[in-house]
Amino acid sequence: MPAPRSVAVFVGSLRKESYSRKLALALGEMAAPDMQFDLVDIGGLPLYNQDDDASSPPAYEELRDAIRRADAVLFITPEYNRSVPGVLKNAIDIASRPYGQSAWNGKPGAVISVSIGAIGGFGANHHLRQSLVFLNVPAMQQPEAYIGNAGKLFDDAGAIAADATRDFLQNYLAAFARWIDANQAG
Ligand code: FNR
């Protein structure tokens, strides 16, 4: 059997009961054995300070290495005030520097936005995509994933409750695996 594609997963919420995190965990189970999901801890990162580029703090380097090691990156994020939560933007900025050495460069990616509301985090999803264009992360265009009504998404075991949603996400994962293969760097 070929090795699974390794996916560095970035969750844009630090909340213990985060729906975004629950979705990341559920998707990780659904994605096996084709993909291996590794959730990257971004909650302990210091706020990005450009003065630190020269000294490269260990936390910065660990984040950049986690991205470089992975075949692909997946963002699963809530929407805060119609945009990307600061904790996720901070991680994006840290890994984008020093200038000319961005860890994101060329890494195939995908975006899933999550909301308790009906719009499914559309604003965050597309603000994030704006950064990914600049960072040269080829971000899967279709299918798009705006997951609304997140409060009703899971059963008691943390699995996706509705068959239709599970089918949609399984299809999304299959498309992402093809996207990774088609956009693999080098
Ligand atoms: C929100 N929430 C929210 N939801 C939305 O659909 N659009 C928005 O712009 C916002 N803005 C927003 C700002 C802040 C500061 C908070 C704390 C929350 C609600 C959000 O969808 C809800 O809290 C989710 O449960 C957050 O995702 P996690 O933590 O469950 O992954």
Image: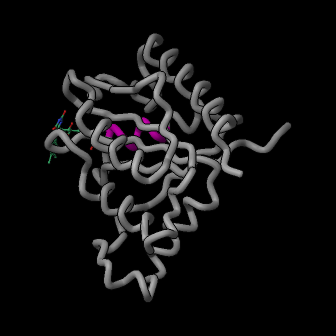
Who's the residue at 39% across and 62% down the image?
42
Residue 41 horizontal side relative to residue 34, left or right: left
> Where is 67 relative to 119, above or below?
below
The magenta span reads: 19-25
Q: Is residue 68 above or below residue 122?
A: below
Q: Position of residue 46 (x, y in %)?
A: 32, 74
Q: Quadrant of ligand 1?
A: top left
Q: Quadrant of residue 182?
A: top right
Left/right of residue 163 with respect to residue 92 in the rendered view: right
Instruction: Left or right? Give the position of 142 relative to 12.
Output: right
- Residue at the outermost top position: 164
Q: Residue furthest bottom?
A: 55
**Quadrant of image for the N terminus:** top right
State the residue at coordinates (49%, 47%).
137
Residue at 55 percent across and 59 percent down: it is 67
Residue 145: % across, % down: 40, 26
Look at 82% across and 40% down and name the residue there.
Answer: 2
